[in-house]
Image (cartoon, rainbow, N blue to C red):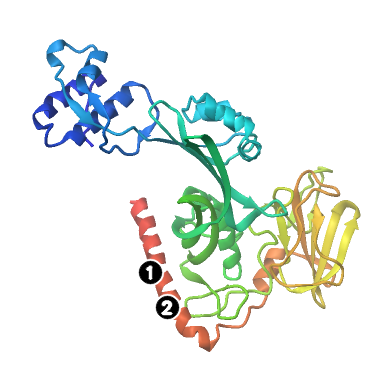
Amino acid sequence: MTHFQGTAQTALQTVVQHAVQSIHRHPKRLAAAIATLLLTMGGGAFAIASIESSSNQVVVREILEELALPQAQQPVLALPVAPLTLFRTTTTRSNDTADTLLKRLGLFDASAAAYMRSNKELHQALLGRTGRLVSVEANGNRGLQKLTARWLTKATDGQDADNTFQRLTIARTELGFESRLETLPLVAMQALGSATISSSLFAATDEASIPDAVAVQLAEIFSGQIDFRRSLRKGDRLSVIYEDLQADGESMRSGKVLSAEFVNNGKSNQAILFQEAGASRGSYYSFDGNSLRKAFLASPLEFTRMSSGYGIRVHPITKDKRAHKGIDYAAPTGTPIRTVGDGVVEFAGTQRGYGNVIEIKHRADMTTVFAHLSRIDVKKGQKVTQGDKIGAVGSTGFSTGPHLHFEFRVDGEHRDPLTLVAEGGGAQPLSAAAKASFDKTSLFMRVQLAQAATVRLASAE
């Protein structure tokens, strides 16, 4: 694409003057340049996707006359050019109407707005919703040709489903507009990330544009090797490969961590996600095949940040200093809660200030407590396995807002959950039958992690 400086009128004159002699050899090039300048002069906010030849004719004399150029500079040329296809993207807002959404997309199409208002399915899917990705294709007159909206599928508990998204398409046809709503699988692509610690894990990953959900997984994966509250050092570094779940090439959310390396105080800690044949889920292993799975997960919520730690604090309701005998995790109401280890449900019901509570006995002397729940999904006496969903975050009992209060008790005495997680035992090592397959995966992930580290070093220079 040739770039021009100066006014649009001057640029168009330059294009014509330089192209007249070669018009028979390069008609498409001149057509594209003129069309681009016309769009710029019209104040359009769109980008041109493509221009191809067709039977349509653009008379340069008419273009120049419209610009009121001197007669001497008005050569007569006929150029083939196809109608422009224009694209634009936005996200929906809670106060959107059909007209405001189309206007923000740069469209002025009364028939499209009327169709959107009258189509109940479309109205429910887009208007009044927040954060849904919308893209449009339009003609040169700012008329809607096609609108596509995408969003994550919601499960019955209101959370994002694991592997699918919704796609709503509106298309102009000879008979008017038609719409179609589909449920389609997300495509998992690999994303690389790297960061250097200056203060905390989340500060480093935020600066490196690594999603919070990935940072939480890293803290959980390496919880047995690194104390993320006390052991981080300035200059510690991490590299990570994780799933980027996409819909039609657009990133919708992050998925699982596939591999990671965390250098803490000079010591390298590695993790690779690997699923043995016949296993119901994958587990994390070091590069040499040792399992990183601990007796207890680092957090009862998959993706969240700790809002209040274990120890003395100012109570949010009474405002006096007292011991906080657990950990609070801030999260929206309805966020799924999982059991951190295998066990049996010892209590599922209501307890005074704790509101809705679940207690799980893990072995003769260990119990975990989950309080302020909005929903309880297990019953007393039920066996649970590490990672099973047992309830949802709420604000029942004495609570200032939605969060999970989580406790660990040993022989009835409260203990710091993060300390117990670090002290918990591990799982069985990788089986001999799976070693060959694991070694191939490990080699590939090492190469990928080295690339992520290279990106970090290049960006730091």
Residue at (63% x, 30% y) in the render: 95
Residue under pointer 2 = 440
- Direction from residue 147 to residue 9 in the image, left or right: left
User: Residue 328, percent across and down?
Assistant: 73, 54
Q: Is residue 13 visible?
A: yes
Q: How many marks?
A: 2
**Of 446 and 105, which appears nearest the observer?**
105
Secondary structure type for disc 2: helix
Residue at (86% x, 72% y) in the render: 381
- Direction from residue 446 to residue 325 in the image, left or right: right
Q: Callout 2 environment at 10 Å: few (<14), some (14 to 19), or many (20+)?
A: few
- Which residue is most to the right? 352
Residue under pointer 1 = 447
Under mark 1, the amino acid is: Val
- Direction from residue 335 to residue 256 in the image, left or right: left
Under mark 2, the amino acid is: Lys
Q: Is residue 231 visible?
A: no
| Labels 2, 1: front one | 2
Q: Is residue 297 above or below residue 404?
A: below
Q: Quadrant of residue 168?
A: top right
Residue at (21% x, 36% y) in the render: 28
